[in-house]
Amino acid sequence: MSNLITIQDIRNVRPIAANIDINRYEQFIEEAQNIDLKQALNSCSKDFVYFLTQNTTVARIQLLLEGGTYTYQNETYSIVGINKALALYAYARIIEATDLTVTGHGVVQKTNDWSNNSAVERVAHQAQNARTIAYQYVGEVVDLLCRLAADYPEYGGVSNAPKSFTATRVNKFDKTKLKSDRFIGYGGSRYR
């Protein structure tokens, strides 16, 4: 299966050093695509991600991959797209699994001309932040797939959407109506 993104797509969402061996990091893109993205999409189709890799030039698939706007019940919605989500998933895998100096003042603490290793907690926080954003981007795509299920029969329909993406949206946050103070973010408006 071919990869949906390249190392340049990762550089477009997060700064990483220009002098890295691209071939060394292709495995992280593959892992992000075959594990993280598949899990987040939760499609019952045999392999929805494989379907996406084989149809990258089809307009309706380009909307899923590259993002854009769509209309559902006279409302216009905007999505960022799978490729940016996948780039963030791959970035998280790269910074956790390598001793690569990812710069742009992240992962390595620059105190002088030499680099010091970042604290494990900082790296883990940065990776989790990237995954959280990616998960939100995939959630936007899943919402589109559920709303326009007739246009995307390859996905498998609304019943296949992860439950965390099908929670009810609320416009006002009222902690008194919650049993717990715990709030988890998908688009800043979903509760568990």
Image (spheres, grey):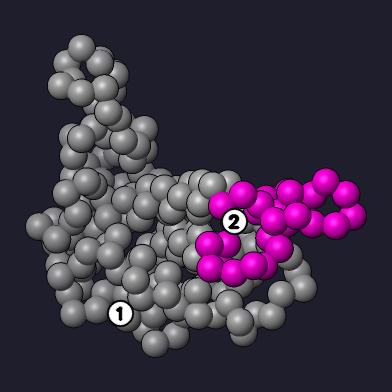
List x then y, in percent, for residue 26: 54, 80
Which residue occupies 34% across, 37% down?
Answer: 185
Q: Please indicate, yes or no, whether residue 57 appears anywhere in the rendered image.
A: no
Residue type indicated by callout 1 = Phe
Residue ID for mark 2: 13
Q: Quadrant of residue 33?
A: bottom left
Q: Earlier in the sequence, mark 1 or mark 2?
A: 2
In this view, 141 is above or below 122? below
Circle 1 crowding by C-alpha within 10 Å: few under 14, some 14–19, many from 20: some
Nearer to me, 138 or 131:
131
List x then y, in percent, for residue 177: 17, 16
Element type where label 1 sits in the image: helix
Which residue occupies 32% across, 51% down?
Answer: 139
In this view, 2 is above or below 180? below
Which residue occupies 38% across, 47% down?
Answer: 136
| Numbered marks: total | 2
Residue ID for mark 1: 51
Residue type indicated by callout 2 = Val
Task: Work out which residue is located at the far bottom of the displayed protein and give it.
Answer: 1
In the picture, the disc for residue 137 is none
Can residue 77 be found in the magenta stretch?
Answer: no
Query: In the image, is 112 to the left or to the right of 100?
Result: right
Task: Work out which residue is located at the far left of the displayed protein and give it.
Answer: 159
Nearer to me, 152 or 16:
16
